Image: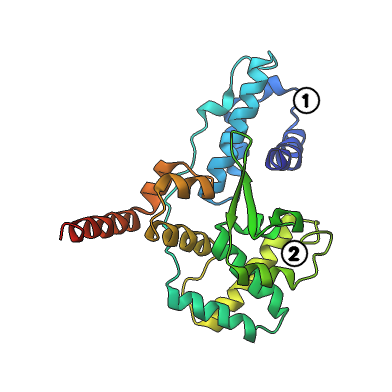
Amino acid sequence: MRKYRHLLEDRFIPWAEQKGFRNIRHVSVDALRQFRQTWTDSPLYATKNLERMRAFFRFCHQAGWTKDNPAKAVKPPKVTQSPTLPFSRDEMKRIVDACDRYRGHKARMKAFVLTMRYTGLRIADAIRLSKDHVVDGRVFVRTAKTGQPVTVPVPPHVIKALNSLEADAGRYFWTGKNIRSAVSNWSRYLARIFELADVKDGHSHRFRDTCAVELLLAGASVEDVATILGNTPQVVARHYAPWVRERQERLEKLVRHSWG
């Protein structure tokens, strides 16, 4: 809902008022194409926003407020995704060690890095992590479609790092105000850590990739990894195909070895 509110209330409505639209029925395909041209989003985020516009106008159409869904005729931008790679174990060690040389809050930085590595949380979700989401050595990562909570156990040193922090407003890494600014700030902090660790092409999403790949190599199924990440098994199998193959080859080697 937050992303819909930002797109519609903060962007679409002011634009429509500026263009003189007073009724949703007056918004045509051409008008939405013009609105789309004002976006400065990345291709991937623009595609997501177009999906939200289509969902909004689908609701309007079903409610009888519009004759059709003009957003359906607006083409999404071409998205070329470059898959990120997991950190090697040597890179992870250098990253964790670099936290001790960080000029800011060293303990908080290390706790954040370890949380991202061992939970697979996206950066915004890691920033939102609250104290009541860490119970008995497990971290709540999301709620499944069945309504059941999905938690992951994390190593004791991760829990120790979190417990060493003062949780402002019940959260470890965020005051609760302006998540966009928080994401920007933490991305900048991480960039400094990657620089200190001499890790090229460092990016927060690589912690998520590292978590997924290490799980696969440890024997976790594609379905289990998908459950933790909140993706579909198809997405996991496609995105982490090289490591899924490596895991399969290792299992086959173990089976052959068992023949004696």
How crowded pointer 1 is (Cα within 10 Å; few <14, some 14-19, many 20+) is rated as few
Picture quadrant where residue 242 is located: bottom left
Q: Who is closer to the viewer here, 247 or 233?
A: 247
Q: Residues within 10 Å of mark 2 (few under 14, many from 20)?
A: many
The number of callouts visible is 2
Mark 1 element type? loop
Please identify the quadrant where the N terminus is shown: top right
- Per the model, the C-alpha gap separating discs 1 and 2 is 45 Å
Q: Amino acid at mark 2?
A: Tyr
Residue 206's label in the rendered image is: none
Residue placed farthest to the front in the image?
260
> Above or below — where is 118 with respect to 245?
below
Image quarter (top left, top right, bottom left or bottom right) of the C terminus: bottom left
Work out whether residue 175 or residue 213 is closer to the camera in this orientation and state it.
213
Which element carries disc 2, helix, strand or loop?
A: loop
Q: Earlier in the sequence, mark 1 or mark 2?
A: 1
Q: Nearer the viewer, residue 41 or 170?
A: 170
Label for residue 172? 2
Q: Is residue 57 above or below residue 198?
A: above
Q: Percent x, y for residue 23?
A: 75, 22
Which residue is located at x 69 percent, y 38 percent?
4
Tell me where residue 244 appears, x and y as whole percent: 33, 54
**How did the renderer colour the structure?**
rainbow
43 sits left or right of 184 in the view: left
Q: Which residue is mark 1?
A: 22
